Amino acid sequence: MLDLIGAIFATAVSVTIIGMLVSATPARASTRRAILAAAAAWGALLVLVTALGGFAPGSTGPVPGPIVAFTVLVVLLAVAWLRRPGFRNALLATPLPVLVGLNAARLGGVFFLVLLARGRLSAPFAPSAGIGDMITGAFAIPLALLLARGDHAPPWWLGLWNAFGILDLIVAITLAVLSTPGVPFRVFTDGPGTLAMTTLPWIMIPVLLVPLFLLIHLVIAVKLRRMAVVLPLATAS
């Protein structure tokens, strides 16, 4: 039952994030369709590889399969950001309340704690990732509401929250790598480590949702940087 609930939640979050980012941008209809098609193809590929055991421990040698898939998607997004001005500008045109509000989905970090309680994930990865995500998601809600109402939340609040969200993801990724079963560099060896994250539906978190949230945080950081430049100019004039 937990896996079924997790599958529904992960799918709903993925579809919502991609749908909101695509619909909120001024990109042409053909570009939007291309992005949606690419996202659907990536999701289908992940399901197929997982079903065939491609993410099982040892299936890709000393480098875990989820790390390979995560790196591939991050590189693809980074190349699109750096080499495709249309892609970058479309994301930067997304309203800040939308970008911040999407992080409310990280309240789903409670799943990490449930999997820990059921012995399917281990510490320190599960509690760190779960609690960090829940804190990020909880603070995203009031911040998004303030922005949506047009209230001017202090930029440093947003900057601090955004930095925390990024740090949470980086720490979670690091602990996940050091807790992965079947690799020579595993440091945290007690329990199942991150074994559950190599199976459906939980594989969707490291190989789809984490890269998307990293991208969202990047866009927020750039928008906040631009706001910091514009506000002094407006005050001076």
Image (cartoon, rainbow, N blue to C red):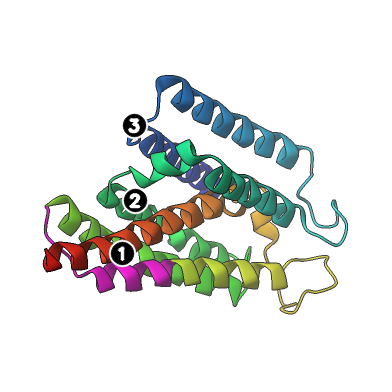
**Which dot, 2 or 3, sits closer to the camera?**
3
Indicate the position of residue 76 as horizontal and vertical percent values: 63, 45
Can residue 87 be spotted in the picture?
yes
Please name the residue that numbered disc 2 is placed on: 99
Please tell me which residue is depicted at 50% across the width and 63% down the height of the picture: 114
Q: Position of 71 compared to 171: left or right? A: right
Magenta segment boundaries in residue numbering: 150-165
Label 3: how many Cα within 10 Å (few below 14, some 14–19, many 20+): some
- Neighbor class of circle 2 (other Cα within 10 Å; few <14, some 14-19, many 20+) is many
Q: Is residue 152 magenta?
A: yes
Q: Are marks 2 and 3 in contact (CB under 8 Å)?
A: no
Q: Amino acid at mark 2?
A: Leu
The residue at the point 12 percent across, 67 percent down is: 235
The residue tagged with tag 2: helix, strand or loop? helix
Residue ranking furthest to the front: 237
Q: Could you tell me if the residues under marks 1 and 2 are in contact, i.e. CB atoms within 8 Å?
A: no
In the foreground, 78 or 46:
78
Image spot of residue 200 (x, y percent): 63, 45
Eye-nearest disc, 1 or 2: 2
x and y, in percent, of residue 108 in the image: 42, 56
Amino acid bearing label 1: Ala
Disc 3 marks a residue whose amino acid type is: Pro
Q: State the SS at label 3.
A: loop
Q: Nearer the viewer, residue 45 or 23?
A: 23
Q: What main secondary structure does the magenta stretch of the protein show?
A: helix
Q: Which residue is mark 3?
A: 26
